[in-house]
Amino acid sequence: MNIWKDDAELFQIARKELFVALVGDVLDKMGYQHQFLSPTVKPIKKDMVVVGRAMPVLEADVFEESSKMTNNPMMKKPFGIMFEALDSLKPNEVYICSGASHRYALWGGLMSTRSIKLGAVGAVVDGYSRVTNEIENLNFPTFSIGAYAQDQGPRGKVIDYRIPIEFNGIRVNPGDIVYGDRDGVLVIPREAEIEAFDGAIIKARGEKRVKKALENGMSTVEAFNKFGIM
């Protein structure tokens, strides 16, 4: 049975007591050994932490903002259905986007402002972010491969959202938990979340006891034999 009563409590525990590496270690033991996104995906500020439910977004490259010669009505819409995707965000959700090349930014300051108003808790994009100073001032947890000002307007469109996507080869389903800090971003599948976070919470609280024992002079051999944690 899970230790927390709802998402709000779990995410608060994750921010205060846990760290991403710890949950990743538990997932490894469970057999989920390929859940980390690429190490190139980093927070724009090193102290940013993202934890929430995935709202996956699929982006695609285009070569003009609004196409006149097209068989697809979406190609006439600037940004595709990005505005609809953004407006669909709910409290405790993370905008997580992949599918595009790395020629332009997928996230920015106005998107962060709208997301905060809707109660979303972060953005994770397989590409660049921009208007970095504004995002930092808003303190909106944003994870990207770096800062780059070039706009997606004539270069990319959102073509779908709230669907399964792949991000660096990792499957991301709507409602999976996305958990990231400066050490990396982890995708925790729904079917694994209770066992993974229960295990991480128990281990984190155990590690506090180990730390105290070591500070009091216990050897690492004794500590591991007593607590089974190191």
Image (cartoon, grey):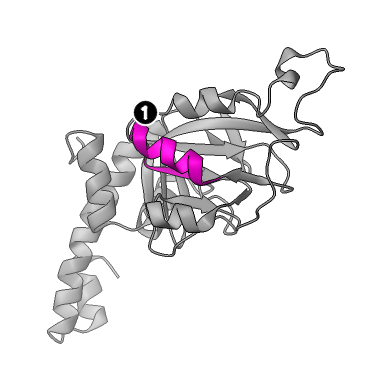
- Name which residue lies at 65% across and 53% down: 149
Check if residue 114 falls in the magenta segment. yes
The image shows residue 112 at horizontal and vertical percentages of 45, 42
- Name which residue lies at 36% across and 45% down: 51
- Name which residue lies at 28% across and 50% down: 14
User: Which of 47/3 is in front?
Assistant: 47
Query: In screen coordinates, is 180 left or right of 208?
Result: right
Q: Callout 1: 10 Å neighbours few (<14), some, many (20+)? A: some
- Name which residue lies at 70% across and 17% down: 74
Q: Which residues are magenta?
A: 108-123
Query: In screen coordinates, is 17 left or right of 181?
Result: left
The image shows residue 144 at horizontal and vertical percentages of 56, 52
Query: In screen coordinates, is 19 left or right of 111?
Result: left
Instruction: Tell me the amino acid under the disc marked 1.
Output: Lys
Is residue 185 visible to us here? Answer: no
Q: Main secondary structure of the magenta part?
A: helix
Q: Which residue is mark 1?
A: 90
Residue 220 figure quarter? bottom left
